[in-house]
């Protein structure tokens, strides 16, 4: 940062005298050039500086503390929003109105005491105007003050109402990841995942698995990477998901917010925004429920530019999904930046086991969070030690239904699911049905029924039903040996009627003869058959519950 000399260089004599008056100094030099060295010498006196700090208004002390926390500098957009602007006026107007004696903002109080400067600095990600404390002003290490935000979490503990209904963190995302990978491998539309907190659409799951390197450019599982992930112990798999998400530069939560639509080619830095929020979350005391609304509100007042380092609230084209209203300007901070913080807490941080959630009542949006029992390990890149292992065995019924508990080995379920049609899951297990079509689909992917049998024998809780084994082996040898199908039947009183019908123009609608008086008719031909029978002098009744046409 610039020092005091560079901060005051270029100022006229009247300005330097205003600074001197604020410090209780008498400056009698004839011009600015000779006055500057005298003023600089006085401002370098630690005792005088401390006396100045002691009489500063509280809000001015807080502004200096905020700058000290930010390494002595802060984007001017953020600083002026928090502590007010400095009026732009010429020397004549300034000398008449005396803003040093009648400041309208905390920024003006500091400016006319030379406690802050204003200059363009290289503050990543770009060059931007900034407020700063002159580098040689002896503030550091003195009896200054501490801002309330230093090493304390934003916000406050949750009220009993905010934390009434607890929603614990789980590792269910590992099972959902297995489901997503298996569905993608089969070319199926992944199911809707049942989660608490923010919704977890399949598109977001794809971004998450892509972030840890499990998918190719077409969104298909990479065989070796997926196998290693599914075979890894649950603690290691959960840590891998968390690290992939937290370190990702491409997983962009801002563009996932369900109520917002983003347009244009502007870019944001999801990693930096995510890291800032995680750093603040990590300060929350373990075992304490923390208010989400107060957390967001405090960041709004202290660190509003956490995802916009340049303080730019106009160039990002974001609108509300429902109304189509564009959310530009700082007045929409809560709709965009605040919504992102809530999404990070109730979405990825909850899905990945870092935080528990709580709500005022059942089905109400989460209003509080607390660090999970796994968070201490996960935050230090240690696999959590108290996750139950994937050791539960599956069960196979005689009619070919596979029932797999949530704690069954994920790699096994991924493989077995590729041989089956998927049934709705319940609260206890995943369910799959072996059918000829599913086996044929597996065969087309190069899988063999012998692989399925070996898999089920290895992971079954009981011996496989002999009839099920026999059916699989027979299908492997000769294919389908029995078919069930619906059909419309024509039943006549005399074989002669059936014989006459077969010689008529209706013959093209007739199918397999089941007996001398019963024949299958083709789908959709019932009305045509009845018309031909009428032309032949026979009345017939329409198809009934038994799917038969009775000639009478």
Image (spheres, helix red, strand yellow):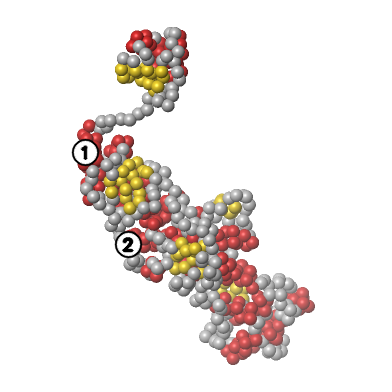
Name the quadrant of the C terminus: top left
Q: Which mark is residue 305?
A: none
Q: Can residue 341 be seen in this view?
A: no
Taking 253 as reference, is 216 above or below it? above
Percent from the top left, x then y, of residue 19? Answer: 68, 83
Helix, strand or loop under label 1: helix
Residue 130, picture quadrant: bottom right
Helix, strand or loop under label 2: loop
User: Does 6 sit left or right of 470 as displayed?
Assistant: right
Q: How many marks?
A: 2
For the point 33% across and 60% down, which residue is it? 234
Give the spatial CA distance, label 2 vs label 1: 35 Å
Q: Which mark is residue 388?
A: 2
Percent from the top left, x then y, of residue 225? Answer: 32, 53
For the point 61% across and 80% down, which residue is it? 61
Q: Nearer the viewer, residue 305 or 93?
A: 305
The label nearer to you, 2 versus 1, is 1
Percent from the top left, x then y, of residue 112? Answer: 67, 80
Residue 27, picture quadrant: bottom right
Q: Do the residues labelled 2 and 1 touch (CB within 8 Å)?
A: no
Taking 489 as reference, is 250 above or below it? below
Residue most extreme to the right: 96
Q: Which of 1 and 421 is in front in this view?
A: 421
Residue most extreme to the bottom: 47
Residue that numbered label 1 is attached to: 470
For the point 43% across and 24% down, which residue is it? 544
Q: Nearer the viewer, residue 457 or 40?
A: 457
Q: Mark 2 vs mark 1: which is more N-terminal?
A: 2
Q: Which of 211 and 552 is in front in this view?
A: 552
For the point 29% across and 41% down, which residue is it? 400
Percent from the top left, x then y, of residue 275? Answer: 47, 66
Name the quadrant of the N terminus: bottom right
């Amino acid at each position: 940062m610039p020092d005091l000399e560079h901060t005051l260089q270029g100022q006229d004599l009247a300005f330097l005298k205003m600074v001197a008056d604020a410090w209780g100094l008498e400056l009698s030099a004839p011009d600015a050039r000779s006055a500057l060295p005298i003023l600089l010498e006085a401002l370098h006196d630690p005792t005088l500086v401390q006396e100045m700090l002691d009489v500063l208004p509280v809000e001015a002390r807080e502004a200096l503390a905020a700058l000290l926390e930010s390494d002595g500098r802060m984007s001017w957009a953020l600083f002026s929003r928090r502590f007010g602007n400095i009026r732009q006026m010429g020397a004549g107007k300034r000398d008449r109105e005396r803003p040093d004696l009648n400041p309208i903002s905390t920024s003006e109080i500091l400016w006319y005491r030379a406690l802050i400067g204003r200059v363009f600095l290289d503050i990543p990600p770009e060059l931007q105007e900034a407020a700063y404390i002159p580098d040689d002003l002896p503030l550091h290490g003195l009896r200054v003050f501490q801002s309330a935000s230093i090493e304390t979490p934003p916000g406050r503990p949750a009220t009993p109402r905010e934390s009434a209904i607890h929603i614990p963190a789980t590792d269910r995302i590992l099972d959902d990841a297995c489901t997503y990978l298996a569905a993608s491998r089969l070319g199926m539309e992944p199911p809707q995942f049942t989660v608490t907190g923010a919704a977890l659409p399949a598109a977001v799951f794809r971004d998450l698995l892509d972030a840890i390197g499990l998918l190719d450019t077409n969104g298909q599982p990479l065989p070796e990477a997926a196998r290693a992930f599914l075979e890894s112990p649950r603690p290691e798999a959960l840590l891998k998901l968390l690290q992939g998400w937290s370190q990702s530069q491409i997983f962009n939560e801002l563009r996932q917010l369900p109520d917002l639509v983003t347009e244009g080619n502007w870019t944001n830095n999801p990693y930096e925004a995510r890291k800032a929020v995680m750093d603040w979350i990590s300060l929350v005391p373990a075992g304490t429920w923390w208010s989400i609304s107060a957390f967001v509100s405090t960041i709004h007042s202290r660190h509003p530019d956490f995802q916009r380092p340049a303080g730019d609230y106009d160039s990002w084209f974001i609108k509300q999904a429902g109304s189509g209203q564009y959310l530009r300007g700082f007045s929409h901070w809560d709709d965009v930046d605040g919504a992102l913080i809530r999404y990070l807490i109730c979405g990825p941080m909850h899905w990945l086991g870092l935080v528990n959630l709580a709500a005022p009542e059942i089905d109400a949006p989460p209003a509080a969070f607390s660090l999970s029992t796994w968070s201490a390990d996960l935050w230090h890149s240690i696999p959590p030690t108290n996750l139950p292992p994937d050791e539960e065995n599956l069960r196979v019924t005689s009619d070919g239904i596979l029932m797999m508990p949530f704690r069954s080995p994920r790699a096994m379920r991924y493989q077995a699911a590729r041989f089956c049609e998927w049934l709705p899951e319940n609260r206890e297990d995943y369910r799959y049905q072996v059918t000829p079509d599913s086996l044929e689909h597996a065969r087309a992917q190069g899988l063999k029924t012998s692989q399925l049998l070996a898999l089920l024998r290895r992971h079954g809780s009981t011996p496989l039903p002999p009839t099920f084994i026999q059916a699989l082996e027979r299908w492997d040898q000769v294919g389908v040996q029995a078919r069930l199908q619906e059909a419309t039947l024509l039943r006549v009183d005399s074989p002669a009627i059936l014989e006459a019908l077969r010689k008529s123009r209706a013959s093209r609608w007739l199918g397999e003869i089941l007996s001398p008086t019963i024949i299958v008719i083709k789908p959709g031909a019932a009305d045509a058959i009845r018309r031909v029978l009428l032309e032949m002098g026979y009345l017939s009744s329409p198809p009934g519950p038994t799917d038969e046409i009775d000639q009478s």
